[in-house]
Image (cartoon, rainbow, N blue to C red):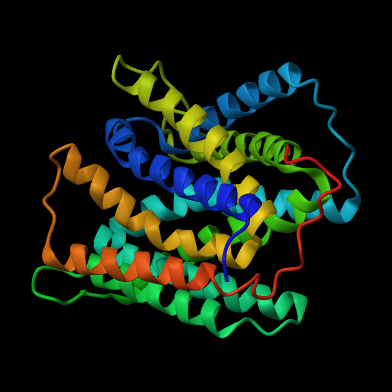
Amino acid sequence: MMLDARERSGAALALGAVCLIGGSVAAATRLHGYPLLGGQAVRYGLATVFLLIWARVRRHTFPRPSPAQTARVFLLAATGMAGYGAVLVHATSMTSPGDVGVTLGAAPLVIVLVQSLLVRVRPSGNLIGGALCVAGGSAVAQLSTSGTAQWNAQGLAWSCLALTGVCAVTLLGAPATRALGSLTATTYACALASGMLFLAAVINGRVTGAPVLRRPSGAELPALVFLALGVTTVVFLMWYGAVERLGAGRTGLFNGLVPLASLLALAVTGTTTTSLHQIAGAVLVLVGVAFGLRGGRGGTPPPRRSRPAG
């Protein structure tokens, strides 16, 4: 099945979003000493400001969401934005980042299956095969040099919670985007995530005495700005633009490229080297994405074209 122009642009948007997310790894390493919850609150707060400026430039009018739409956006902000960031950091403290990456590599398969259950449409064989190939490729890429992943119960549990956040970005964001548009849904969710994180930082500070915020250093400030503008504002707009063009199932396949993009970013910055496992995994992921994209919308209803993307 050949992709039309709209679907090709969706694939390009998803790929661009994945590349930016991979670049966030280097930025995140500069924030290890910065207050976690407060820093994430600033990140999403700055993203909200950028989105509001962009909306004003485009003369965008924000529609008032219905109660059901508000609930979806709230859940998206809590799980796919605010919750995911905190859970991911804790998961990597409980087990190795490679082991967490193995779990996150299953996101395409989970998204395809859950989305199909939600809309009660059987996914195509190509889409299921592509998702399995992407998940398998991500797992292979994250294996240690000995070819094993050392799991522990707590690390696996927290990694699965992080996987839930990754899937929520697409599964909860897709209906919100169809109803409200990508710009509106992203702005509302970022504003809510910032408020949630700031409240959590204040509560944590009163309980533990940890600082809520502090003035960022010369290295931390550009990292915060990059995460807010490039990895939050631009990535979410690109990702939901892809969802509108490809559907949630096929867009979800690109999640399999996120661990590989992160590994590439670390290799470019000299943080780590590339192994044969990673090269083999990259080939499997690319094959899986290409195969899955040929499989139709796979359980996702056709995007509504009456509303502009944003």
> Quick check: can you spot residue 305?
yes
Instruction: Tell whether 277 sits left or right of 188.
Output: left
> What residue do we see at 41% from left, 65% from top?
104
In the displayed structure, 62 sits above or below 110; it is above
Instruction: Tell whether 168 sits left or right of 27.
Output: right
> Quick check: can you spot residue 157?
no
> What residue do we see at 63% from left, 57% from top?
4
The quarter in which the N terminus is drawn is bottom right
Query: In which quadrant of the rendered view does residue 181 lie?
Result: top right
x%, y% of residue 151? 26, 75
Query: In which quadrant of the rendered view does residue 224 lie?
Result: top left
In the displayed structure, 119 sits above or below 41; it is below
x%, y% of residue 128? 52, 81
In the displayed structure, 280 sits above or below 87; it is below
> What residue do we see at 63% from left, 72% from top?
296
x%, y% of residue 198? 58, 33
Depth check, front residue: 57 or 27: 57
The quarter in which the C terminus is drawn is top right
> What residue do we see at 21% from left, 44% from top?
266
x%, y% of residue 275? 12, 61
